[in-house]
Image (tube, grey):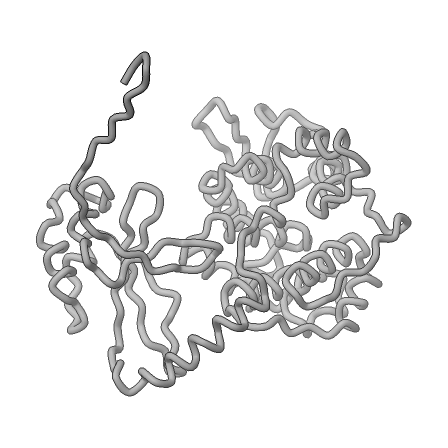
Amino acid sequence: MILSRNSNKTYTNIYTSVLDVFAFFYFLATGNVYTNLNTTTTNLLTLQIIAIQELYRGNYEKAYKLYVKIMTINNKSSLEKGVFYYPISNYYYVLTMLLTNTPEALKKIASLSKCKSASKNYISCLNSCYFLVAPFKQFFCDKVDIIMREQYLLECYNRNSAIFKLSKMIYQRLGTLTENKKNVSEEPRWAYLRNEMQVAKNSEEAAELERKFGGKSLFHSLKFTEPWKMRLESLIQSNISATTADKDMSENMLIYLLRYSTIVPILKRKLKNGNWSVGKELSISKLKALDIAELDKTDHKLITEICAWDYSLDINDYLHLLTGCDHVYIMLNNTMQPVSIHEEKPCLIIDKTKWYL
């Protein structure tokens, strides 16, 4: 695919050359771009360089769209669909989904974890992406304690020491492995690893890495509840669920997620194990056509007030209709948190000083 950042024209090329492989790993190793991304023929690997750069710059939605396109290209030439051959590609793919932070993006992590080459039964192979995908899926999607046997991680080390260091960093921060004293001889040489692991020798090197990649460590920018707090919250929630299970016999649950400047309706369904599904985002047309017994007065009022030509629910236009609603949420630390919408009269505060109001 030839992709110019200054042009809307694209040309498909699903194949990669030796130079493409070199350019991709040269970028990871040094932080420098070997080729001109504005004019070069971009494909599975060179397009990833652009996506990773956008990711570091904080353009998560743009990186998400790029990775969706990259996975489509990958599926046309890969032996297994839905997973990249190089483990590091899966690492940045998962981070993109987490930083995009939508139910649809989290589903892609779950889909990736089901691939054969991302399962623990595939660890004897050169591909060791299991150690990069599994902890993220268990911690952020399933919200359970991470299951990991250290000998599995050692197998990863025997195959790919760079991926071992990356995996070890993930497992340590997510509360599975204890922190070990740093050993200078074990510090990584790859530029992307030094940036992600935050092991720069000094502030000058850290600034240089940030300049080359476009930002600081993506992994350490993830905000989430500490593992011990999450376990405590899980215990409290399980107790609450146990006492209210008989009272709540609903099979569906409509919630509203406040995302940026829009209100996103999400329909959750009760699973066989009693838990709620991740949920599916509803379009305006599907929301207006929704016919379930669990809709309350607030839901009916909002649906009735939706303008026929609107394709999304703008917060400025519809938030007031959710006043007093008990199923409104925001995304905080990769977890949906309930919020209360209430109405207050505007007030004006004037501070008088010696020279001006």
Q: Residue at x 40, y 83 (%)?
A: 273
213 with respect to 187 (left or right): left
* Of residues 7 and 265, the one drawn nearer to the viewer in this rendering: 265
Relative to residue 192, is residue 108 depicted above or below?
below
Q: Quadrant of the N terminus?
A: top right
Please give left or right for residue 288 compared with residue 174 in the image: left
Q: Extreme right residue here?
A: 185
- Tell whether 338 sits left or right of 139: left
The image position of residue 302, as x and y in percent, is 14, 54
**Quadrant into which the C terminus falls:** top left
| Of the pair 354 and 222, the residue shown nearer to us | 354
Q: Residue furthest bottom?
A: 246
Identify which residue, 313 or 222, lies in the foreground. 222
Image quadrant in which you'd find residue 179: bottom right
Residue displayed at 15% across by 51% down: 321
User: Residue 14's quadrant in the figure?
Assistant: top right
Q: Residue at x 65, y 34 (%)?
A: 213
Which residue is located at x 70 percent, y 61 percent? 172
Residue that sits furthest to the top in the current view: 355
**Would residue 328 be found to the left or right of residue 76 on screen?**
left
Give the percent coordinates (x, y) of residue 246.
28, 87
Residue 289, horizontal then vertical, whole percent: 15, 60
